[in-house]
Image: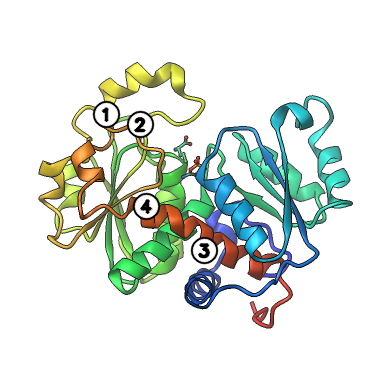
Amino acid sequence: MRGQDLLSVTDLDARQLELIIETAIAMKRDGSPALLTGKTVAFLFEKPSLRTRVSFEVGISQLGGRSIYLSPSEIGLGVREPIKDVARVLSGYVDCLIVRTGSQGVLTELADWASVPVVNALSDDEHPCQALADMLTIFEVKGGIRGIKVAYVGDGNNVARSLALACGLAGASITLASPDGYELPATDLEKARRLAGEGGVIEAVDDPRAAVNRADVVYTDVWTSMGQETEAAKRRDAFAGYQVDKSLIALARPDAVVMHDLPAHRGEEISDDVIESSQSVVFLQAENRLHAQKAALALILGDNERQEV
Ligand code: CP
Ligand code: NVA
């Protein structure tokens, strides 16, 4: 994985995803060696963040590296200067770019021109770092990922896409339920199916109850993502009936867990009693951002002996 970009879950193969999870578990259990000593990572964030920014900064520091946060106004990606110039200038100073932006095309352009790895810290299309933490969490709470049945209820957005691809890669089944017009495109389901091969079943349904029926994991995300705020009222109407609440969870397996990448809009995609219930693992999931990303960065940038992939 050394030197590899992480723009999409599809940048990983099944063995690499497994290795990230194994490494994260080992680091969580035994602590982490200073694999990033002398390494500097630059953050280019064009949208707000709590979990992603803090977990990456803390993780890099725990691995002995350092990070520099660059605010949108400082960089003006493509405004103050061309994206390809930013990529080449920063490549002369730092060892990795961690980027949160809207367009996947901006990430691809940065990666094309940078001589250092670029990591997607959320785009409109994908949230691969979230998916790594999600897979780690499922592994921990369910004792494995292969054969697990995941239900995703809500918007067919960045989080849903990366989750579906990661389920495909890891051998989990996923059923997505979204209202008309808000589904994950069929091309993404196909992509996830190709990754799954003979592994998990990847499917989409209309009825959230059909998706959640006998599920091991029930996952949801906000109906209105960052940048879609003007659509909030329209989306609240469109998603009526898609809230993950007690009556929906009752259809899942009794030992099912509830996941959400956070931040949550309680009372919209998830009820307060469900997110606060004993079935909710959202804070473990948030903590696992730290461990999963440390593992990914160690494998992409670190001077470790486990560079066989
Ligand atoms: N889940 C997640 O990416 O959270 P932030 O937007 O706070 O980073
Ligand atoms: N879908 C959400 C995820 C936030 C972590 C968004 O893009 O705003």
Rendering quarter of residue 102: top right
Q: Whole-Å distance between the Cαs marked 3 and 2?
A: 27 Å
Q: Can I make out residue 170 in this image?
A: yes
Q: Residues within 10 Å of mark 3 (few under 14, many from 20)?
A: many
Q: Are marks 4 and 2 in contact (CB under 8 Å)?
A: no
Give the Cα distance between marks 1 and 4. Answer: 25 Å
**Where does label 1 land, which residue?**
239
Q: Amino acid at mark 3?
A: His
Tell me the distance, in whole angstroms, between the alpha carbons under discs 3 and 4: 13 Å
**In the image: residue 167, left or right of residue 60:** left
Residue 75, x across and y down, in percent: 78, 32
Label 2 sits on what residue type?
Answer: Trp
In this picture, is 26 found above or below 262?
below
Quick one: label 3 or label 4, which is nearer the N terminus? 4
- The coloring applied to the image is rainbow
Q: Position of residue 135 (x, y in %)?
A: 41, 62
